[in-house]
Image (cartoon, grey):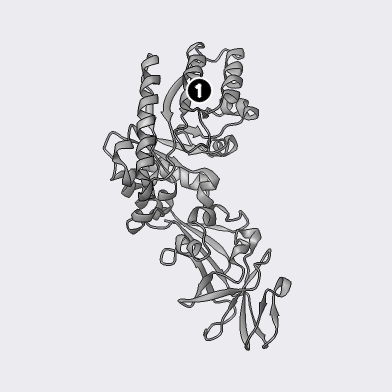
Amino acid sequence: MKKTILEIDLKALGHNFNVISSKLSSQTKFMAVVKANGYGSNSVEIAKRLEFLGVDYFAVAFVSEGVALRKSGIKTPILVLLPQVESIKEIIKYNLEPSLYSFYFLDNFIDYLSSNERKNYPCHFKINTGLNRVGFNEKETEKAISKIQSCDSIRLVSIYSHLAATDDSQESKFTLSQINLFKKISSNIKSELSYNPILHMSNTSGIYNYRECEFDMVRSGIGLYGYNNELNKELRPVHTLKSIIAQIIEAKKGDSIGYNRAFICTEKTKVGIIPLGHADGINRYFSNNGYVIVGGKKAKVIGNICMDVFMVKLNDFDVHEGDEVIIFDENNNAEDYARSVGTISYEILTNLSERIERKYIG
């Protein structure tokens, strides 16, 4: 029976992992970013496949995401990029590796480890080199490292930073300044330690465009799921979102379609009702905007996106109720779909609701 479904192509995931890995030196470690439910797919299924393929590390945004992976049986090390003080007990319980990014978190984490007599707990030190999102800036680094050195609770397994504009050739000067600052600060930190943390900075587009910041490990998120500008030609989208035409309505000239009468028919109009809405991640900026693929042709969205459905214009389409509708797939991918309304594939994929059934291919 045809219905709304999100297909996750695990063979495409493996293909993308191999393509990105082929860009790296044989010694470089690979960290797979599986936050936001594996970029709208399923973090557990994605992580299981990547663990089988031999990935070295996983990264998630929040502790709850790491806990879900551990509960599913994932054994690979997991970096938590934005851990919160309230989740420190869970970090320890589930053997997660927190990012140290602020004095507030660092002080609380040291206090907890010390009071529980934990030593050499694996952590990652985040440097802010210009993205200005999270992390210790250059002036704060010495004080932070001094706190870490003054206790035996923490062992830094890595030092890392985050690039801001590796996919923008107009910002190469800024990117190189970030890389050079990271080299300077990380070198200073390593000179203070009696051991040798690994360094990582590069994201997917950085892997392709800036070989000088490969360091000891790279992080790839969106590339694993099939997207990243110039790499798009080699990568295969993992997500395919399909639905059906639930009903076809014949509207007259002058009839309005949907809430707030946002679309007025200028002619007799065949309207297809698609059972997906903003509760499923089809954002309202697709209202009277964007398109889906019906019978191999683009069908324009008309009217406002509703909570559970949206409408498309099917004049000159030879279609029937129950026919398949492609929101995006490998040929008309999420980046194309996003571009039609001025957003990005990240937002499209990570907005996909849990109520959409997932089906795993390969």
Residue on which disc 1 sits: 140
The residue positioned 38% from the left and 25% from the top of the image is 186
- The quadrant in which the C terminus is found is bottom left
Q: Residue furthest right?
A: 260
Picture quadrant where residue 356 is located: bottom right
Q: Does residue 6 lie above or below 54 as drawn?
A: below
Residue 316 shows in the view: yes
The image quarter in which residue 272 lies: bottom right
Task: State the image coordinates of residue 354 (x, y, percent, origin top left).
Answer: 61, 53
Three-letter code for the amino acid on which mark 1 is drawn: Glu
The reply to whether residue 1 is visible in this rendering is: no
Q: Is residue 16 above or below residue 31?
A: below
Q: Secondary structure at mark 1?
A: helix
Quadrant of image for the N terminus: bottom right
How many marks on residues? Answer: 1
Q: State the residue at coordinates (32%, 47%).
A: 208
In the image shown, does 214 or 128 lie closer to the viewer?
128
- Residue occupying the far left of the picture: 26
Tell me if 197 is positioned left or right of 84 in this view.
left
